[in-house]
Amino acid sequence: MDYVKLAKTLIPDEDLLPLEEYEKLYPERNMERGAEVTRLAPSPTGFIHLGNLYSALADERIAHTTGGIFYLRIEDTDLKRKVDGAVESVIRSLEYFGLNFDEGAEIDSPLNKYGPYYQRQRASIYRAYAKSLIERGLAYPCFCTEEELDKVREKQSANKEITGYYGVYAKCRNLTEEQIYKNLAEKKPFVIRLKSQGNAANKITFKDCIKGEITVTENDQDVVILKSDGIPTYHFAHAIDDHFMRTTLVIRGEEWLSSLPIHIELFSLLGFRLPKYGHTCSLMKMDGEIKRKLSKRKDPELSLDFYRKAGYYPTAVVKYLMTILNSNFEEWARKNPQKDYREFPFSISKMGRSGALFDIDKLNDVSKEELATLSAEETYDFLNSWVKEYGSDGDKVHFADKEYIIAVLNLVCGIGGKKRRKDIVRAESGVKMLDYFFDDTFSPNYCYRFGGETVNGVLEEFARLYDPADDNNAWFAKVKEVASEFGFAPEMSMYKADPQAYKGSVADVAEILRIAVCGMPNSPDLCTVMRILGKERSLNRLKSGKIAQ
Ligand code: GLU
């Protein structure tokens, strides 16, 4: 068969360069020894998930701790799945979590010398290499229809054979020159398939940077490399792009492990050096007793938007992911509480080999701790940025009064006090926690444990005595005074010594006041809450907290 003529017929493009030119165009990167080039290569589907962030964090850490490059490539060969604005959304999402690309799609960088970074814009390079494989007799046109392929698959499944296009099933592999040209003359649509040189009886030992040594079966599938519209498949585009973008380490999900033999063969037939691979394990969660993969359909926490909307502090999410990625991170972070997580010596060899367990309770703990390291100003900035994006109009009005919010935060978080409180887990619930400091969002739950006469008496009397100029001691002395007046023990010790003699203790009186002022039985220091609310608002609350009789 005249393969050169066949290649020219199938791929008549005039604009393809001789292959050596592509090597010159995209030379080896001039980098220090040990520097790794990694990439994130998402499809622009608009759905960027925790698994992407998890992989991207490993990519980013490895590139940046070795002095390498982390770039963004968009795998947009499947137009059906393309969503407008998806690329910006990937970049913005990762940026939110503090991960920045050094080069790539939509990244403004002088380093962008290995593009274009959209696969759709790289058609000629894929076609040049497909043409060369045809010329060398290593690829061929396949005219099989979807129906024919379905039938073959059904037959293989019924015979319990491996499904796919290989061996005796690779019908078009052995078409004669005459048959091929006849099909072409009849304008039958065709794809280009690899003519695999492999043998499934052979095993290959492979060293995965995460999973360690694994044994895989040699590829014998004649996989499609160019689809009927001339667009490459993932397999082919991956080999060409990662070679010419000079990726040194491919980190990707373990779902790709089964196609690794195809990639090993493709790199070899194309004459490219195989990059290192690290296949990450899937993120799992406990569903009752069962450990299962996080699912797009069942688990909202898989979507990265979930963390932004819920207002997780980005560094907390990243630090939590670091604890799953590197088994020794948690201990390091405990020993180095002041250090930025970027100072941690990230190591691919410490990545887990099997199912990484994602535990949202643990994330909440990390988040609380992380937020408790912020100053009132920083906490305000973080909550305010969430409010601007996701808050209600009311929240926006509240947050416009920065001074007031800072005073509230100082109190609620115990900032500068003896004990730093760690109640804020994330912005959404944190902002909600402040609702009772504003009349329009104050929604009290008057859950008094005493009758109307006592409650109303206490509230009225305390309102009469209240003086905003009182310090904490004077304020508390008045609570005691009211306690005595209404049959409560003014000292806890008195109550404990003879509980029968009283309605309750001073703590119960404080609770009545707290319920009236804050709308709940728990709050930070009530005296300070009242001071922040101001005299008028405090007195109003004491009044409206009365039980209707
Ligand atoms: N586009 C592929 C994906 O989104 C990329 C896999 C890879 O990183 O090579 O799964």
Image (spheres, helix red, strand yellow):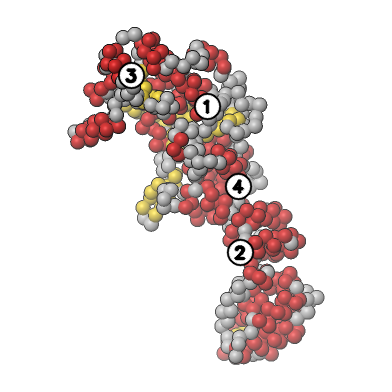
Location of the C terminus by quadrant is bottom right
Percent position of residue 214, x then y? 37, 30
Circle 1: element type: helix
Badge 3 or badge 1: first in the primary sequence: 1
Badge 4 or badge 3: first in the primary sequence: 3
Question: Which mark is drawn over residue 121?
Answer: 1
Percent position of residue 287, x then y? 39, 54
Q: Which residue is mark 2?
A: 432
Q: Which residue is mark 4?
A: 315
Percent position of residue 67, x then y? 61, 28
Of tags 4 and 3, the one toward the viewer is 3
Residue at disc 1, CB closer than 8 Å to ligand 1: no
How many residues crowd mark 4 within 10 Å: few (<14), some (14–19), many (20+)?
A: some
How many residues crowd mark 3 within 10 Å: few (<14), some (14–19), many (20+)?
A: some
Tell whether label 2 touches label 1 (CB within 8 Å): no
Of 162 and 226, the residue lying toward us: 226
Q: Is residue 100 above or below residue 473?
A: above
